[in-house]
Image (cartoon, rainbow, N blue to C red):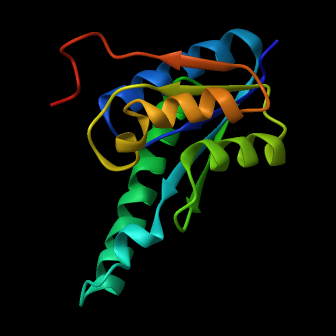
């Protein structure tokens, strides 16, 4: 049974679909979710004069994304906690694998389409990295063709 389910989130429709799928599995199996939002510091520290402000905005947005996903879990009566992880240029697949091992996840649920934030990593190579590097089974939740949340 999959009771400890890790879900990378970014606030996109695709990410939300992954959360919904994970919540359904957790509810059926008496499980819980660990929601992870990856923040690549290097993306905000590359020559911008106001990089500290941009980084703070990115952290605030990440916190909101995690809060929204936790609210979804609360509505579904599924225990969930969130973690904002600052990646500093590390690949999403490595980060997810590390978090899955550290938290002793049974399953990773990941969205495979999207346009904003972390989801840019999930267009192709990122999802493939997660599938290849995760130490546990991975459920890839696809957004139907033509539905990318915008």
Left or right position of 121 against 114: right
Residue 139 in percent (x, y) is at 60, 17
Q: Is residue 92 in view from this perspective?
A: yes
Residue 104 in percent (x, y) is at 84, 38
Q: Is residue 78 in view from this perspective?
A: no
Give residue 47's quadrant in the image. bottom left
Q: Residue at x 35, y 73 (%)?
A: 44
Q: How many marks do you count on the picture?
A: 0
Q: Nearer the viewer, residue 118 or 128?
A: 128
- Say above or below: 57 vs 10: below
Q: Nearer the viewer, residue 35 or 98?
A: 98
- Say above or below: 11 vs 147: below
Q: Which quadrant would the N terminus be assigned to in this image?
A: top right
Left or right position of 121 against 146: right
View extreme (left): residue: 150
- Say above or below: 9 vs 142: below
Q: Residue at x 48, y 24 (%)?
A: 18
Residue 59 in percent (x, y) is at 42, 67
Q: Residue at x 45, y 59 (%)?
A: 63
Q: Nearer the viewer, residue 119 or 57?
A: 119
Q: Which quadrant would the C terminus be assigned to in this image?
A: top left
Residue 141 in percent (x, y) is at 47, 17
Q: Residue at x 48, y 49 (%)?
A: 66
């Amino acid at each position: 049974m999959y009771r400890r389910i890790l879900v990378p989130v970014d606030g996109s429709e695709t990410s939300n679909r992954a959360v919904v799928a994970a919540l359904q599995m957790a509810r059926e199996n008496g499980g819980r979710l660990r929601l992870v939002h990856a923040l690549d510091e290097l993306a905000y520290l590359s020559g911008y004069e106001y990089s500290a402000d941009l980084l703070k905005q990115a952290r605030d947005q990440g916190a909101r994304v995690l809060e929204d996903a936790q609210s979804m879990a609360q509505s579904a009566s599924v225990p969930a906690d969130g973690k904002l992880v600052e990646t500093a240029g590390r690949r999403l697949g490595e980060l997810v694998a590390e978090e899955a091992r550290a938290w002793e996840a049974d399953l990773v649920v990941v969205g495979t389409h999207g346009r904003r934030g972390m989801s840019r990593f999930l267009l192709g190579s990122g999802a493939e990295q997660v599938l290849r590097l995760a130490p546990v089974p991975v459920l890839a939740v696809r957004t139907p063709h033509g539905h990318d949340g915008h």
